[in-house]
Image: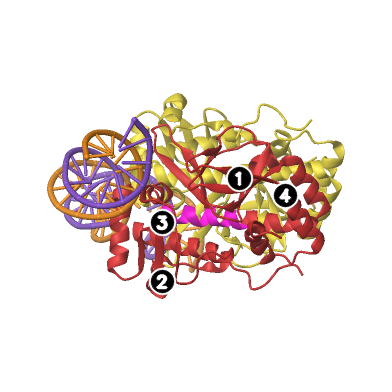
Chain colours: A yellow, B red, C orange, D purple
DNA sequence: CCGCTCGGCTGATCCAGAGCAGCGGCGGGC
DNA sequence: GCCCGCCGCTGCTCTGGATCAGCCGAGCGG
């Protein structure tokens, strides 16, 4: 099995113990490898998607544009994440997806997904688990925007992102590499880019996190977790649910 | 078929044309009728749910509490909505649910749901459709909190709620009855209760909506829609997707 | 009948974060 | 080698909405 498949496999294995048959079906999802340039819009809001993607390398983000030209980023996708899965299963897309960096992804046709799920129900369960975890993250993000201060939002987002990246083997407890610009963070957290800059400076001066030159360093993980009110239980699993 | 079943049936039929077998399975979900007092906490965050509920009458809301005592309401449930479905399918709850009014609901055991879905795949598809629509609403809500002003949020929320209620036969284009207090609206829209009051007054003075005495009246639907940037395509369906 | 709570309503003050304006560094295209 | 556009960064001013404080009317329990 190639390195490029390992992110998704690693993530799903944390949820459900996968048998060889499941892994083989999963491998079949990875036949159509494609790559996209940074900034490429992969999914357009409103258009039905005939295929989904599994991110192998690089980052993407899903967002909605508003009539006044501002945008709100709903979620960030990292290696191992599905992209456009809902659009395939339900024939409609309610948001757009854009490549943040150059990225490598496997294109999976709708028919392959449906067949694969029928043949490997445990795999289907694992993928649904992952989808539900994504939904939980969206809910947490909503709480961020509704009830947390700018500092808390930033702290919470960076901690969550760090935890997700560790799940797929990128980054560690000390920090991670992050290609997001301050503009991305602004659109993600519902702030202005100017204020993102100040928040980052403030957190750095407090000795909590340092985000510079595309690298996030957790200087004081405990303090940051307390500030954010971060509870990682919705991401972690003590062990596979199904054995 | 009883009146109490009709809300869910009506909603699902707008998505997928259901056969008699599907309707019979659906009817089987309604055997355990229960009722709850206003304010009763039906689902507790963190606890695994062995059963879900189908709301027959009354309103509920799902929310998360923050360490500092504030809360964020994620979504409002009206008759015809599922409640705790994700908790059943995935054995974990990431939010609490509380009865807003006195309410009547059918309790559906996890085993009934799984069996029913196996026997009536079209029904399963319809329910997944509805679940996905709910997710789209959460995303839209997130955009509200991130990028819209207080007035816009309020306008958007009231329009969306009105559209949802019409789907299940409650309220019409002119307005609807609404048991939510200004405190509910505050926790929903990420505002203070004081400011909710002022926003409502402002919208009323502008001749856009009137929310008084438990009744919402759309005085100027077109103007309100424009203010909110409301696009109802994610709620509507021109006709059933599957025939 | 009284008192208490809850929901709606208002005025005054305060502050987090927006908006505007501008600088510097750096990478990429010609 | 020069320009240009993107990204990070900063200071100043302004404002949307929070916070605090308090009033009123309606329901409700004793």
Asked if badges 1 and 4 are on one and the same chain, I answer no
Q: CA distance from mark 2 to mark 1?
A: 31 Å
Distance from disc 1 to disc 3, alpha carbons, whole Å, reads: 21 Å
Q: Residues within 10 Å of mark 1 (few under 14, many from 20)?
A: some
Residue at image coords 57%, 51%:
A101
Q: Tell me whether circle 1 and circle 4 mark residues in contact (CB < 8 Å).
A: no
Q: Nearer the viewer, mark 2 or mark 1?
A: 2
Mark 4 surroundings: few (<14), some (14-19) or many (≥20) residues within 10 A: many
The answer to whether dots 2 and 1 both sit on one chain is no
Q: Do labels 1 and 3 touch, CB within 8 Å?
A: no
- Distance Cα–Cα, label 3 vs label 4: 40 Å
Q: Chain of mark 2?
A: B
Whole-angstrom CA distance, mark 3 to mark 2, is 16 Å
Residue beneath disc 3: B147
Q: Quadrant of residue B109?
A: top right
Residue to which mark 1 is pinned: A134
Give the numbered dot on residue B29: 4
Q: Main secondary structure of the magenta part?
A: helix
């Amino acid at each position: 099995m190639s390195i490029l498949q390992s992110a998704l496999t690693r993530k799903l294995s944390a949820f459900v113990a996968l048998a060889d048959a499941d892994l083989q079906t999963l491998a079949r999802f990875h036949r159509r490898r494609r790559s996209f340039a940074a900034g490429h819009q992969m999914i357009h809001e409103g258009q039905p998607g005939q295929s989904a993607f599994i991110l192998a390398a690089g980052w993407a983000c899903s967002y909605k544009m508003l009539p006044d030209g501002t945008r709100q980023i709903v979620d960030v996708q990292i290696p191992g994440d599905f992209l456009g899965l809902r659009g395939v299963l339900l024939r409609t897309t309610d948001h757009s997806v854009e490549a943040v960096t150059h990225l490598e992804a496997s294109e999976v046709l709708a028919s392959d997904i449906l067949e694969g799920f029928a043949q490997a129900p445990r795999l289907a369960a694992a993928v649904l688990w992952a989808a539900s975890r994504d939904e939980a993250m969206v809910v947490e993000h909503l709480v961020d925007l509704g009830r947390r201060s700018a500092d808390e939002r930033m702290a919470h987002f960076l901690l969550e992102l760090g935890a997700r990246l560790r799940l797929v083997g990128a980054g560690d407890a000390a920090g991670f590499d992050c290609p997001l610009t301050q503009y991305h963070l602004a659109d993600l957290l519902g702030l202005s880019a100017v204020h993102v800059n100040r928040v980052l400076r403030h957190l750095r001066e407090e000795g909590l996190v340092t985000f510079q030159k595309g690298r996030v360093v957790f200087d004081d993980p405990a303090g940051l977790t307390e500030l954010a009110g971060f509870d990682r239980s919705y991401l972690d699993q003590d062990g596979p649910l199904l054995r």
